[in-house]
Each structure stands twice: as structure tokens, then as C-alpha cells.
Amino acid sequence: MTDYDTFDGRFRSLVIGTAAVERLWTGGRWTEGPIHVPAAKAVIWSDIPEDRIMRYDETSGAVSVFEHPCGYHNGHTLDACGRIVACEHGGRRISRLGFDGHWETIVDRFDGKRLNSPNDVVVKSDGSIWFSDPSYGIDSDYEGRAAKSEIGACNVYRHDPHTGETTTVVTSLDRPNGLAFSPDERTLFVSNTSLSDTPAIHAFDIAEDGRMVDGGRIFAVSDAGFFDGFRLDRMGNIWTSSGDGVRVYAADGTLLGRINIPETVSNLCFGGRKRNRLYITATSSLYAVYVYATPADRPVTSPESAAHPGNR
């Protein structure tokens, strides 16, 4: 099996045919939530059932435990100041790692009720925090702590850190999971991992006020397992996890190609000194491959929005 399958000629301009997929580490139970932290020259990711965060040092190649226990982290992103923002199954909250090394709660309730188990998160250029909240972390004790949903639904939320207000933005998906913005932040993409629905990535147009979304449409359908986490490059292509590897879709929805990974892929992110190394979490391992693509940067809409985009 080759590392690449090309379905559209545009794929050849995105991947390096001679660059092999490397397995950097193995030993997890279900790896998830990779995020590149430029200031630390490192990638961190979750091993959810083991309740630990792992760290890959880009300068030495060493892998270590970043934190254990950690509240069963899932997805991660960076805010405008480069701080890690996390989804916690155990804490049922969105938290942030402060400069003092302590995790602080950003949001853990909606309408006075506890969140289910936040799954993935992205910070928009206006500072707002958008996150999905399916029930995987409370469905059993394997990836969190078994509990009954207080909200009774799985939604995507927008949290305004300036006002403290949290609002629903997507309520139509049974199990919203991975999410990311288009490069111009006019579209929100959300994957649905419901067993009762067709595995798909849905696209929602964002209103002019930047706060609400429309009813959405299906962007891509998977015929091989679920789409879980994904990222967009600067050209608007979607690099997404799937049951058969990493799939790359053009902005028009065309499947361009696939990077073959020997385990089920959960998520990915761009990193490295030139931001052209794709890090991939898949079942028990962390993989990486150099590509021609680089991540989409968020547009800066206010002086408070600093250099680091929210979703890399």
C-alpha cells in the first residue's frame, strides 16, 4: 500500500510524493486533539481513556506525559495569546491553561445546566470560543465519567468571553464533533458522528454579525467510517480524519486524495517550524508527514486579536 491515493490532479500540489508517513509514537488507547504550540516547539495531544495529555518535542523527538490526570481532555486549540484552550470530558467544561500553569474554567454550563462533554473547540478572530458538546464523555466511564445529560441535547455553542454569554449556534446535528472555520470565517464546518445519521461534514454560513449560522448543508459524505476532527489549509481545502486515512477535500467539495494511515484516524493539525508538517492522531499512535500545504490563518478583526489563529 502506498502512502497516497490521488483522485484529483490538484492533490499532487498539496502532498510531497517522496515524503513518507512516520509513526512518531505509539502506546495510547484512543489518541485525539493534537495541537501545535509554536512557543514550546511541541505538539500536545490527548490519550482520552488513559486520562493524560502527551507532548512531542519537535527539537529532540522525545515524547513525554504533559499532564496526568487531566480531566479526560479531548480537543485543543490556541487562543489569540497562544494559550491552550481545552475540551474536558471529565470536568465537562472548556478550560484554558494560564501563563501560571493552572487550568481555569472558561464555560461549564448552559442555561444553568452542566455541559455534556465538550469535544472540539476553535477560537474565532473576534475572541469568541466555538465548541461542540456531544455526550461521549458521559455515555460511559471509558472516556470520562458516566452521567445523565442535564441539557438533554448535543449542540454547538458560541461563548463570548467579553460578556460571558453562551449561545447555541447549531442544534440540528445528533452528535456534532469536529469543527473549524473557513479561512475567511464566513463558514463553520462541523462533522456529525451519529450512528443514526449519514457520516458527513456539514457547512453552516455565518451571519454578518458573526454570531449566528444558517440551517446548514452537507459538504462531504464519508463512505468509510466517520469524519472526526479536521483542519483547513490556507487555500480552503479540508484535511479530515476518516475511517480510511486522512482525506483531503477541495473547497468545492471534491475529494482530492487520501493519505493512508494504518490505524483509524481521529484528528490532525499542522505544525513544524514552517507549519508544513501534518501531525495525525490515530487510535494508539501519533503520525506525521511533511506536505506542501500550510494552515489557514484567521483574519485579524480587532487589536486584541494577536498572531496565533485559533485552529491549526
Image (cartoon, helix red, strand yellow):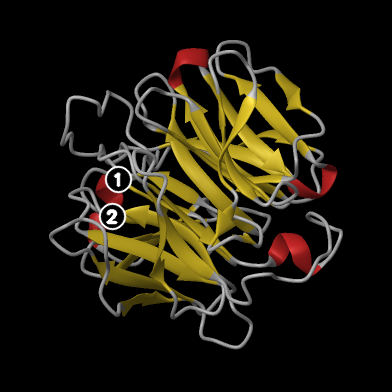
Give the percent coordinates (x, y) of residue 229: 51, 56
Question: As drawn, which residue projects farthest toward the front?
Answer: 112
The residue identified by callout 2 is 237
The residue identified by callout 1 is 233
Relative placement, left or right, of 12 versus 170 is left
Q: Which of 208 and 121 is in front in this view?
A: 208
Give the percent coordinates (x, y) of residue 86: 57, 40
Q: Which of 189 and 234 is in front in this view?
A: 189
Establish if 227 lies above or below 216.
above
Relative placement, left or right, of 80 versus 281 is left
Q: Which amino acid does label 1 sit on?
A: Asp
Give the percent coordinates (x, y) of residue 211: 26, 58
Circle number at residue 153: none
Binning the other alpha carbons within 10 Å of mark 1 as few (below 14), some (14 to 19) or many (20 upward) gives many
Q: Which image quarter holds the N terminus?
A: bottom right
Establish if 198 lies above or below 283.
below
Q: In which quarter of the image is residue 109?
A: bottom right
Q: Do the residues labelled 2 and 1 touch (CB within 8 Å)?
A: yes
Secondary element type, mark 1: loop
Question: As drawn, which residue projects farthest toward the bottom?
Answer: 196
Binning the other alpha carbons within 10 Å of mark 2 as few (below 14), some (14 to 19) or many (20 upward) gives many
Residue at image position (75%, 35%) is: 70
Give the percent coordinates (x, y) of residue 149: 70, 70
Residue at image position (40%, 38%) is: 312
Q: What residue type is labelled 2?
A: Asn
